[in-house]
Amino acid sequence: MTTTGSCMCGNIRYQFTGEPAVTALCHCIDCQKWTGGAFTSNAVVPRTAFSVTQGTPNSYDAVGASGKINKHFFCPNCGSSLYTELEVMPDMTCVKAGGLDGGAANLGNKIGVEFYVKDRPQYLQPCEGAKQEPQFG
């Protein structure tokens, strides 16, 4: 199975093969600023299963709470968030679900885990069945 996605303007396209290892929401302050929203929704896939198939994204390095680098990739034209590579997870890519094609942004209607629930806005409720983590790891 191959899942495809793109930025808003279509200049950057990407794909991953297989099922996500985990589906996750992250409510950390970094992700809130990264999206301009309350969280990121992520399909976490092996880096070897992920590839950019069109265009060249820009990146921005942020230092996470771990002290390690979170490398955020985005479209240089429209600014869409695309994916993140976390130094603490060197074998995985966190694909931002909002850019996935064909309804895949719903992540199969199942969130496996919510990270940084300590930073989750109080108006949001926990996702039913998702593991609730105060921080990452």
Image (spheres, grey):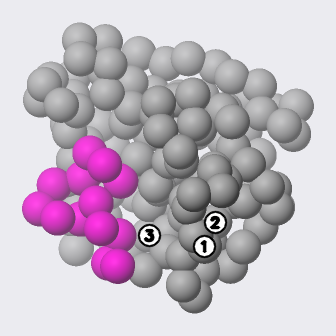
Is residue 136 among the parts visible in the rendering?
A: no
**Is 56 displayed left or right of 27 in the figure?**
left
Given this view, does label 1 or label 2 mark the residue nearer the observer? Answer: 1
Q: Which mark identifies residue 68?
A: none
Identify the residue under disc 3. Answer: 20
Say what amino acid the circle numbered 3 marks.
Answer: Pro
Q: Along the line of sight, which residue is nearer the eye, 83 or 114?
A: 114
**Is 1 displayed left or right of 113 in the figure?**
left
Examine the image and state in which quarter residue 133 appears.
bottom right
Residue under the image location 24 percent in, 53 percent down: 100
Percent position of residue 27, x then y: 63, 50
Disc 2: CA contacts within 10 A as few (<14), some (14-19) or many (>=20): many
Q: Which mark identifies residue 114?
A: 2
Asked which secondary structure carries label 1, the reply is loop
Furthest-top residue in view? 77
Labels 3 and 2: the sequence-earlier one: 3
Please say if 123 is above or below 51: below
Labels 1 and 2: the sequence-earlier one: 2
Please say if 68 is above or below 103: above
Say what amino acid the circle numbered 1 marks.
Answer: Pro
Percent position of residue 114, x then y: 63, 66
Q: Quadrant of the C terminus?
A: bottom right
Is residue 109 among the parts visible in the rendering?
A: yes
What secondary structure do most residues of the magenta stretch adopt? helix
Percent position of residue 5, x then y: 21, 47
Identify the residue under disc 1. Answer: 126
Q: What residue range appears in magenta?
A: 97-109
Say what amino acid the circle numbered 2 marks.
Answer: Glu
